Amino acid sequence: MRFTTIIGTLAAATALWCTPTQAADEIVVGFATAASGFMQAYDKPAQDAALIRIDEINKAGGLLGKKIKPVFADTKTDQAEGAKAGLAVLDQGAELVIVSCDYDFGAPAALQAQSAGKVSFFLCAESIKAGIPGVGPYSFSGSVLAAVQGATMAEWAYKKKDARSFYRLLDSWTVYNKGICDGFDWEMPHLKDATLAGSDTFKNDDASIASQITRIKSLPKEPDAIMLCTMMPGAVSAIKQIRAAGIKSMILNGSGVDGSYWLNAVPDLSNFYVPVQASIYGDDPNPKVTEFNKKYKDVTGGDPSSQYVYPGYVLIDVWAKAVERAKTTDAEPVVAELEKMNNEATLFGPRTFSKELHHQNQGRYLIVDTEEGKPRVVDQWTISEKIPVDYLVSK
């Protein structure tokens, strides 16, 4: 069963403006996201998950007794077009504006929503700017901060794998990569007797990181763990070079390298760990996640490609709960209800929002271990302390 079949008349109506009578029976949710350009690879899977949750809500009777109607505008992976897309869905009556996964590409549409007095949600942005600091008080993100990923991997490796010496290797290409290492930096002083054996940088498109590898191999002792703060596509080359150099240290990374689609480029990769909000590998401890993965495949024709599918489902879930509790879609009362959420249960882990932070500075992660090229969930972890908002804003 294909996705267009499931949402049926909802999708068919997206290009048309409803009559006032129809509008009275509908709540419009606007997707100002990338249907073209490289951001489509990030936006579409999460958007599909959001549409699945919308379909579930509609089949259960709707929201406030009304059907949710999605409308769409293509940002074309362009910031100027993003602003136009935001205005386009607002012109169609959007009460919620959903924007691209990345802060830089999602912010132009989110800022239009803020100016119009409407709530916006980034599909899966993991920078603190994707919220109050970068957009305003009506803006949220459905995912968990990149800094939480770095902190999670450091604390987990220390406490569960007895890692005591770490090497920090930052890909300076994106704010997301820096965020992973920011979280690692915050966590390190909390780990008694843990040491930083060294720190280095590279760029995602560097053909070679030979000099960085030489510095690692020149250490008196190979580090227990390498905190590799990077993302695709350059992550594959960096990981391959590290292992080809004979370095056997455990490699820790962020969620941006989740997925098995790239593993054939690093045959038999082992001792490699990433945090995920839920597992795409059929081994999630929550059977409802496995059920969702099956539904996603039934709807879209393909398996979830990475954990970045899931925040799209989460954002619709928490926004709809806030609307039901507020008994309105008006931004002020909905935001107030969202800000009351403290470890709110969702299918893909708890969510907490506050007046200071519309993102997650702590969260439960599953730990995926890749051994001999096969990823699987081996543990779950929540960092002991929330990363302070002041620290996050200062980075």
Image (cartoon, rainbow, N blue to C red):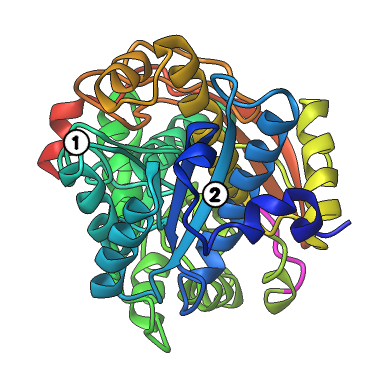
- Quadrant containing the C terminus is top left
| 389 sits left or right of 345 in the view | left
Residue type beneath disc 2: Pro
Whether residue 276 appears in this view of the structure is no
Q: Across the whole image, how many numbered discs are drawn on residues?
A: 2
Question: Where does the image place residue 227, in percent across and percent down from the top left?
Answer: 42, 51
Pointer 1: residues within 10 angstroms few (<14), some, or many (20+)?
Answer: some
Asked which secondary structure carries label 2, the reply is: strand
**Which labelled disc corresponds to residue 70?**
2
- Quadrant containing the N terminus is bottom right
Q: Going 47% across and 23% down the picture, which residue do you hit?
A: 351
Q: Going 38% across and 56% down the picture, which residue do you hit?
A: 89
| Residue picked out by circle 1 | 132
Q: Going 56% across and 51% down the picture, which residue do you hit?
A: 308
| 90 sits left or right of 65 in the view | left
- Bounds of the magenta span? 267-272
Residue type beneath disc 1: Ile
| 86 sits left or right of 116 in the view | right
